[in-house]
Amino acid sequence: MIATARQLFLEGSPRLGNNTATRDLLETKFFCSLRLSNGVYKRTWAGRFYDVDQTLIAQFQRLGVKPKTFLDVAVSSGASTIKWFESLQEAGLRPSMTATDLTMTVYLVRLLSWLHVLVDKEGFPLQYDVFGLASRPRCRIRFYVFGNGLLTILWRMVYAGVARRFDLMKRLKALHGNPPPIDDPVIKAQIKLVTYRLRENKDIELLDDDITAPTPPSLRGRFEVIRAANILNPGYFSTQQLREAVRNLRDRLVGPGAFLLIVRTEGTDSNHGSVFCLGDNGSFEVLARIGKGSELEDLVLSI
């Protein structure tokens, strides 16, 4: 069974036990069940970028540099982010890290005594909690014959109707991504939608960010190292969008000598990426490659 957001994130929920392995398993199943508004699933796996992390650290050692400010974009559940942070510490670095995602901040809303819904900032439902049982907002076609599809449609209709009654979208918009008031009768909690290992790490900042949008002033020129793993994908974006995303990431770098790592995983464990360094003229050069290198090398070098 899939745990509900209330069980995983909120205090006073049913105890999930102190066994770390059990907690990790429940969390993994939870994230693998979440499909975001853009159709992407909120999942990743710890340890999948070990070779990538070691290649990057080897470049730091070769160049004799010890970067301090790191940005990991599109972190999904954040499982690989915490591993990257730990590998940097093990290499003798003292990283100050920021982890961002398009859907980092979400809210748990209580619409009826028996219906809670996990929603993103625009009100898109990520999980229905019906009488304490988790239900997905979307059902695969092949499961409709078992009645799952009818339940999915039912909960969707109930959610839409009750959400309108409470003017949920207006309430969410008024928050501007901030926590709800303690006495809010509908929006019960703000949640950072990443692994507890990331949420409990006080040295890692968690932010919402869209790398295809112009760089917010708070992120401009802040980072010595940026990692973009499994996000700059031609299957997700057009060539023009990819070009804009790389420019936006360059805006987040401190300047010449900073590093940009772009990597993509094929299958479950085959990584291919490139480590770029920003030059004095604002263009990038390739320092190292993992596997076959990044499929975006030519695009990055042309900027």
Image (cartoon, helix red, strand yellow):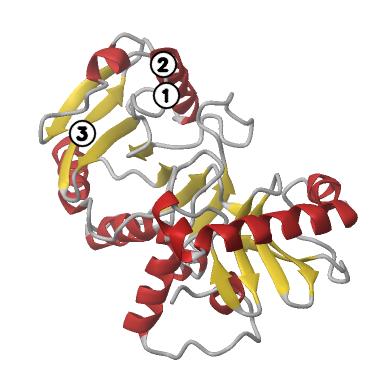
Q: Secondary structure at mark 1?
A: loop
Q: Position of residue 104 (x, y in %)?
A: 56, 51
Task: Please identify the residue farthest to the left as the structure is shown.
Answer: 291
Query: Which class describes the residues within 10 Å of circle 3: few (<14), some (14-19), or many (20+)?
Result: many
| Three-letter amino acid code of the residue under disc 3 | Gly
Name the quadrant containing residue 152: bottom right
Instruction: Name the residue that disc number 2 marks.
Output: 243
Q: Nearer the viewer, mark 1 or mark 3?
A: 1
What numbered label is drawn on residue 273? 3
Q: Of the residues under marks 2 and 1, which one precedes in the sequence? A: 1
Q: Is residue 6 above or below residue 217?
A: below
Of callouts 3 and 2, the N-terminal one: 2
In front here: 195 or 277? Answer: 195
Identify the residue at horizontal 46%, vertical 18% (top origin).
241
Residue 16 image offset from top left, x and y in percent? 48, 87
Tags 3 and 2 touching, CB below 8 Å? no
Circle 3 SS class:
strand
How many neighbours does mark 2 have within 10 angstroms: few (below 14), some (14-19), or many (20 or more)? Answer: some
Q: In the rendered image, which residue does mark 1 sit on?
A: 237
Camera-nearest residue between 15 and 247: 15
Name the residue at 29% across, 33% down: 262
Query: Distance of mark 2 from mark 1, alpha carbons?
Result: 10 Å
User: Which residue is more in the foreground, 29 or 262?
Assistant: 29
Q: CA distance from mark 1 to mark 3?
A: 18 Å
Q: Nearer the viewer, residue 223 or 262?
A: 262
Instruction: Tell me if label 2 and label 1 are in contact, CB under 8 Å.
Output: no
| Disc 2 residue type (three-letter) | Arg
Residue 5, quarter of picture = bottom right
